[in-house]
Amino acid sequence: ERFAEMFVRSRVARGQGEMKIRYELRQRGVKEYLIDAAVLEEGVDWLLLAKEQREKRFGREIPKDFKERARQSRFLAGRGFSGDIISGVF
């Protein structure tokens, strides 16, 4: 339980999304109910975190070009953010 909480905290500090964090914990053999508890305990605003990561990488301006939006969306997906969160960023 403690490991899961520390893991979530460290990954959020790195700017990783919920899906990636959950996947990595599952790979390490952590039970699903402990993962749920650790993620809820941290109380992260995933949308805000995704926006911060996008701005840090690409700047404040939201792209109007479809190709650039797709590129930035792929970046966020690779970070482990869900499609709903990514849609909310743009």
Image (spheres, helix red, strand yellow):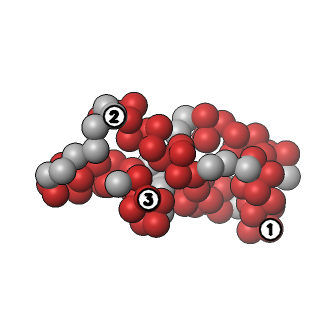
Q: Tell which tag, 1 or 3, sits nearer the viewer.
A: 3
Name the residue carrying label 1.
33
Where residue 51 sits in the image (x, y, percent)? 45, 44
Dot 1 and dot 2 residues touching (CB under 8 Å): no
Name the residue carrying label 2.
60
Where residue 6 sits in the image (x, y, percent)? 76, 40
Identified at 67% across, 48% down, the residue is 44
Q: Secondary structure at mark 3?
A: helix
Dot 2 and dot 3 residues touching (CB under 8 Å): no
Dot 1 and dot 3 residues touching (CB under 8 Å): no
Identified at 54% across, 45% down, the residue is 48
Residue 87 located left or right of residue 39: left
Using the numbered discs, state the Cα–Cα distance from disc 1 to disc 3 in whole angstroms.
27 Å
Residue 2 located left or right of residue 74: right
Where residue 86 sits in the image (x, y, percent)? 41, 58
Q: Is residue 85 above or below residue 6?
A: below
Amino acid at the residue labelled 2: Arg
Where residue 45 sits in the image (x, y, percent)? 62, 49
Q: Is residue 29 above or below residue 9?
A: below
Using the numbered discs, state the Cα–Cα distance from disc 2 to disc 3 in whole angstroms.
15 Å
Determine crowd level at label 1: few under 14, some 14-19, many 20+ residues with C-alpha closer than 10 A: few
Amino acid at the residue labelled 3: Gly
Amino acid at the residue labelled 1: Tyr
Identified at 80% across, 68% down, the residue is 33
Identified at 81% across, 59% down, the residue is 37
